[in-house]
Amino acid sequence: MQSDYLNKKAKLLFAGVSMLAVSGCLYFFMLEKQVPSPTEKFIVEHMTNPNGTLATYLLDAPAETADIVAGREALAESLGLWMQYALARDDQKLFDSSYQVLHRYFLSPQTYLYWKLSADGQSHVTTNALGDDLRIVDALWQATDKWGKEAYNKTANAVTETLLASSIQNGYLVDFHDFAKKESPHTLSLAYVDMSALKRMADHGMIDADMYNRYRDLMRNMPEDGLFYPKIFHVEKQVYSYDDSINLIDQLIVALHRAEIGERSEALVGFLKKEFAQRKQLPGRYDRLSRTPAVSYESPAVYGLAILLALKQDDPDWARELYERMVKLRSEDARYVGGYVFNDNTHIFDNLFPLLAEEAMRSSLD
C-alpha cells in the first residue's frame, strides 16, 4: 500500500513538473521566436498613418473638441514610446524614421512639440505636453549616446530650451504651455515627472543640480494614502491632490519614475499582487476610498507597465505571470494578429506599452 501511494505521488509530481516545463517552454518560445513581435507588425500595418505618424485608435472618428484625441489623430506621447521601443531594440533605422516624423510634423517653428496632430499631420493645437516632451528629449539624448548622431542632440537641446523658457511656474515645470495665449497652469501631473529625462537634462547642463534635486525630493517625499499616489502637485500652493477614481496607468508610471531614483512602491505592488492572485486579472481603475475595482475591463497598457515595474524591482516571477495574462488579451481575429483589439477597435497605448514590456522581458532573458 505504501509503495502504491509513493508511486502515485511520484506520478503526480512528475506531471506537475511536466506542466511547468511545458508552460516555461511556451513562455520562452513566445519571447524568442517573435522577431519582430507580432504586436510591432500590427502597429506598423494597422496603426500607422500614411505619413508615418501613429494613429491613436484603429477606427477613424471625428474629433469633437481640440482637447480630446479621436480616431486616427496622432499623439507626441505615442511617438515617444515608439522611440523608446526603437532604442530597446537597438534599431537605429526605426529610430531615425521616428526622428524624421518628429522633425517634420511634431516640431513647431517655435521649437515646442505639438501634443497632437490630425491624421494628415496638421496641427490644430498650440500647446505642448510636459510628459511627452520629457520622454522624447530623453530618447533623443539616449540615441545620441548610442549612435553619435548630432542631429538628435541638437533637437533635444532646442526643445528643452523652449520648455525651460516657457513652462516654469513657481520653480517647477508644469503640465503644458499655450503658446498662442501665452498661458500655463499651476499644476504638475506626477506621471509627467520623468526622472530619467530630468537626470539627462542635468547631465547635459540644461538644469542645475538644485532643480534636479527639487524633482527628486518631490517624488521621494510625496504622500500616499496608504496605497495610492496623488495625481497632481499644485506648484503655487505646494500641495498634492488625489483623484477619487484611480487610473492604474498613472499609478504605475509614477511608480516607474520613482524607481528611477531607487524608490520602491511596496504598498502599490503588494496590493496589485494580491488583487491579481485573487481575481486572476487587474481591472483598469479602482475607487480610491473603497480600494475596489471601479471598472470591469482590463487594460493591456496596465499589464505592460506592471511588467516593466516588476522587472525594475527585480521580480521576474511576477513579471512572467503578468506577461502570460497580457498576451492572452491579444486579438484572435486573423485580421489583427498581434494586436490588442476589442470590438474591432484599440488604443495605441494598449499596444505600445505591451510591446515595450515584451521587449523588456526578452532582454531580461539575455
Image: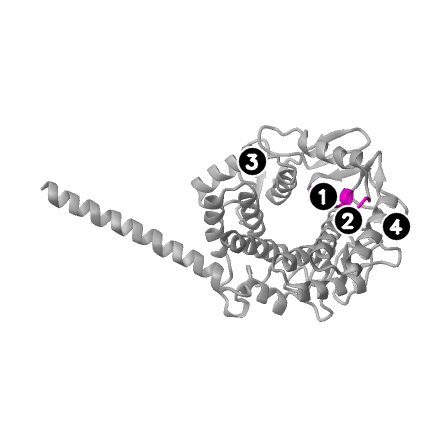
Q: Amino acid at mark 4?
A: Phe
Sooner in the amino-acid sequence: mark 2 or mark 4: 2
Residue found 84% across the figure and 40% down from its top = 168
Region of the chain picked out in magenta, as a range: 194-205
Q: Does dot 2 land on a helix, a strand or a loop?
A: loop
Asked if the residue under mark 4 is in contact with the one under mark 2, i.e. CB atoms within 8 Å, the reply is no
Sooner in the amino-acid sequence: mark 3 or mark 2: 2
Q: CA distance from mark 3 to mark 1?
A: 19 Å
Image colouring: one colour
Asked if the residue under mark 3 is in contact with the one under mark 4, i.e. CB atoms within 8 Å, the reply is no
The residue wearing badge 1 is 192
Asked if the residue under mark 2 is in contact with the one under mark 1, i.e. CB atoms within 8 Å, the reply is yes
Q: Is residue 239 visible?
A: yes
Q: Amino acid at mark 3?
A: Leu
**Crowd rating for badge 2 (residues with CA inside 10 Å; few <14, some 14–19, many 20+):** many
Residue found 68% across the figure and 42% down from its top = 191
Q: Does dot 1 land on a helix, a strand or a loop?
A: helix
Work out whether residue 80 or residue 341 is closer to the camera in this orientation and state it.
80
Sooner in the amino-acid sequence: mark 1 or mark 4: 4
Q: Amino acid at mark 1?
A: Tyr
Quadrant occupied by the N terminus: top left
Q: Which mark is residue 90?
A: none
Q: CA distance from mark 2 to mark 4?
A: 12 Å
Vertical relation: 182 (above or below) 82: above
Q: Which mark is residue 268?
A: 3
Q: Which mark is residue 129?
A: 2
Work out whether residue 222 or residue 281 is closer to the camera in this orientation and state it.
222
Sooner in the amino-acid sequence: mark 3 or mark 1: 1
